[in-house]
Amino acid sequence: MPLEIDVLTLFPPMVEGPIRESIPARIQEQGLAAIRVHDLRRWGLGRHRTVDDYTYGGGAGMVLRADVVAAALADLRRPDSVVILLDPAGEVFRQSVAHALAGSSHLVFLCPRYEGVDDRVRAMCDREISIGDYVLTGGELAALVVIDAVIRLLPGAIDDASTAEESFAAGLLEYPQYTRPAEFDGVSVPHVLVSGHHEQVRQWRLRESLRRTLERRPDLLEGRALTKEEAKLLAEVRSEPRDP
Ligand code: ADE
């Protein structure tokens, strides 16, 4: 059964373009996911198919109407649906959320424009997700980020080795990678990687993942349970003299 995804947006082409390209397109062709994009105006009111209105109390911009969203969800929601509102006030999106969503059977993404939604819309949604602490012009790009991260986790979507690599060092930044030429601009590929010693390569990669995470995102190491090997390698990295 494919993961079914419905996207509600006022700008369908913004969403349709990216999902028709590259790996997302292939994942759909393989039947692992089925993504449908709907124009919210289909549920708009009156001759002008109005979907938004002025905010009570005054202020700049228009907000998405609750009755319009309710009508759209009345048509799309099923017992197994997870309805997601993209909103900067939502839970910050991370890989663990992507994994949780990849285990669903039906996702509905609601992409507001303008100044957001009538607050009563929140009660109609199961989750509110933000892709980070910055403000976009609408939820479309955020929905695409979430969809992309979720569908690549579907079994068979990408090379099993790639997802295995991810769980090998889950929660750490990726280790450095190299391809030919073996020397470029005076910088050589680390010797261990061309040595053919699989075990040494594995350990080098784990150490470098830990090093990179320590240097760039020490917050990721806090509260992460380390294996015995990881703790040993991290202690080694910490005791090395720092690069000037
Ligand atoms: N809409 C506007 N900004 C957003 C963000 N950072 N995440 C999700 N939806 C948004």
Image: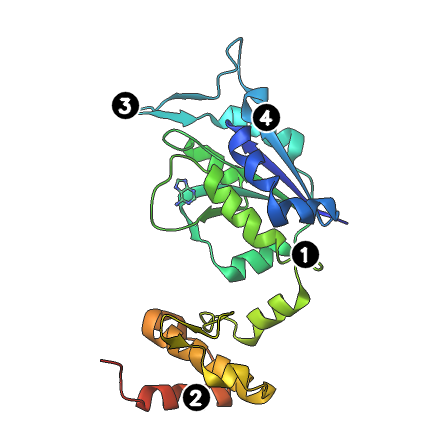
Residue under numbered circle 2: 233
Tell me residue 108's x, y (percent): 60, 40
Q: Quadrant of the C terminus?
A: bottom left
How far apart, in angstroms, are the residues tagged by discs 2 and 3? Answer: 58 Å
105 relative to 208 in the view: left or right: right
Residue under numbered circle 4: 71
155 relative to 51 in the view: left or right: right
Tell me residue 154's x, y (percent): 67, 56
Q: Earlier in the sequence, mark 2 or mark 3?
A: 3
Tell me residue 77's x, y (percent): 65, 37
On residue 206, the disc is none
Disc number lying in front (3 or 1): 1
Q: Considering depth in this image, is 119 or 221 the residue closer to the camera? A: 221
Do the numbered discs 2 and 3 sit on residues whose CB atoms are within 8 Å? no
Residue under numbered circle 3: 58
Of the residues shown, which amino acid type is indicated by label 1? Ala
Element carrying mark 4:
helix
Colouring scheme applied when the structure was drawn: rainbow
Q: Considering depth in this image, is 171 or 190 the residue closer to the camera? A: 190
Residue under numbered circle 1: 157
